[in-house]
């Protein structure tokens, strides 16, 4: 079986939009020793292709981290086959909060050095000595104590659109960057109760062990992350202490948890929490854009990108071909982006 996709992105997206079957968007992870990640990668790809499963999965010697779209009709077969492998027996699933079945358009399984890039030397501390796992109810109760420190272990562009009330939200682009930032900020609070959260729990699993290694005495993490927190509060009728959107790394980009809009359009400043990627294929900058700016800027982040995106495809390809990688507009990532409001203000001022 061919272990890669050969159909272009545009066609794959068209297929998933036209698809009529019902799908379940699910995520799961497990830290477990995998002796031959490449062999497992090939096995899972062949197995899941037959079940018409889509998604993005990372496999490493330390475990697996998966975000997937599974046809309802294939769910039982998928679960049974996964649980037959003793390494993944009864792995907890996190089902998407909002799901129209269009979360992924292809199946990608990659072998990585780690299932989450953290920059840590795992042999320098006990990665199995993790924090206490809190239910949604326990997490809410812990937040009631004013001495409790709540830490968002996600990237800044995730917390920008949704977060737990009063949480510390580090200005970091990656999990690797965030760990030392949080460690420095909390260095004098090692005796305090720390409760941390992330999307599905995988980042907190490693972070909690890292902070315990550095002397923090009362480290706790939200079991199942934000995704399972929402499931629990709905099932138990609990109030949501998370406000706004939960950023997700698939085609949906975000799941709305509450009606609160806590972010602003990066171009005009209007209340907005809609993340988009710049329409210029040479950029694809992730930023927040309201409907008005999307129409005016044709889905682009700057006038330069708008100009390039309006050119014939062959002209766009010529521009990309003659540019060194380090000069590409795609070097702008999240907080490293140019200030889009300033860029547009200067353009208006120059007219």
Image (cartoon, rainbow, N blue to C red):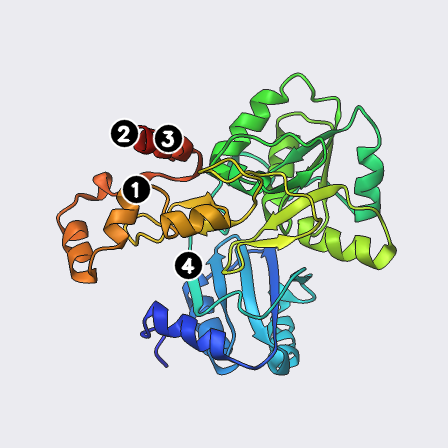
Contact flag, marks 1 and 3 (Cβ < 8 Å): no
Task: Check disc 2 and report the residue beneath it.
Answer: 350
- Where residue 67 sits in the image (x, y, percent)? 55, 61
Between circles 3 and 4, the one closer to the viewer is 3
Residue 70 vs 209, above or below: the answer is below
Secondary structure type for disc 3: helix
Q: Which residue is mark 4?
A: 111
Q: Nearer the viewer, mark 4 or mark 1?
A: 1
Q: Secondary structure at mark 2?
A: loop
| Residue holding disc 1 | 303
Where is 329 relative to 72, above or below?
above
What residue is shown at x 35% (from left), y 38% (from top)?
332
- Give whichever of discs 1 and 3 has the lower sequence position: 1
Q: Residue at x 70, y 48 (%)?
A: 259
Q: Position of residue 350 (x, y in %)?
A: 27, 29
Give the residue at mark 3. Answer: 345
Q: Earlier in the sequence, mark 3 or mark 4?
A: 4
Taking depth in this image into account, of 140 and 195 the one nearest to the observer is 140
Horizontal side of 223 relative to 71 (left or right) equals right
């Amino acid at each position: 079986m061919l272990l890669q996709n050969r159909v272009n992105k545009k066609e794959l997206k068209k297929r998933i939009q036209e698809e009529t079957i019902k799908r379940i968007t699910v995520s799961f992870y497990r830290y477990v020793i995998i002796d031959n990640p490449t062999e497992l990668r090939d096995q899972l790809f062949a197995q899941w292709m037959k079940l018409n499963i889509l998604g993005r999965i990372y496999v490493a010697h330390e475990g697996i981290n998966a975000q997937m779209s599974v046809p309802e009709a294939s769910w039982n077969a998928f679960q049974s086959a996964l649980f037959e492998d003793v390494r993944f027996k009864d792995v907890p699933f996190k089902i998407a909060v909002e799901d129209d079945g269009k979360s992924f358009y292809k199946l990608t399984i990659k072998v990585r050095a780690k299932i989450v890039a953290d920059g840590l030397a795992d042999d320098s501390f006990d990665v199995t000595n993790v924090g206490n796992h809190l239910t949604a109810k326990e997490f809410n109760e812990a937040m009631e104590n004013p001495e409790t420190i709540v830490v968002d272990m996600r990237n800044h562009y995730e917390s920008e659109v949704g977060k737990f009330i009063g949480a510390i939200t580090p200005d970091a682009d990656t999990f690797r960057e965030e760990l030392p930032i949080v460690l420095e900020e909390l260095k004098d609070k090692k005796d305090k109760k720390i409760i941390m959260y992330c999307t599905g729990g995988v980042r907190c699993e490693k972070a909690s062990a890292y902070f315990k290694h550095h002397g923090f005495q009362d480290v706790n993490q939200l079991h199942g992350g934000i995704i399972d927190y929402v499931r629990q509060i709905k099932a138990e009728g609990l109030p949501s202490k998370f406000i706004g959107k939960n950023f997700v790394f698939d085609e949906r980009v975000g799941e709305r948890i509450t009606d609160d809009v806590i972010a602003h359009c990066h171009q005009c400043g209007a209340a907005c929490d809609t993340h988009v990627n710049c329409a210029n294929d040479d950029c694809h900058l992730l930023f927040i854009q309201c409907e008005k700016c999307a129409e005016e800027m044709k889905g682009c982040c700057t006038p330069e990108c708008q100009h390039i995106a309006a050119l014939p495809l062959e002209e766009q390809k010529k521009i990309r071909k003659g540019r060194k990688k380090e000069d590409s507009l795609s070097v702008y990532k999240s907080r490293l982006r140019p200030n889009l409001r300033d860029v547009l203000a200067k353009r208006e001022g120059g007219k």
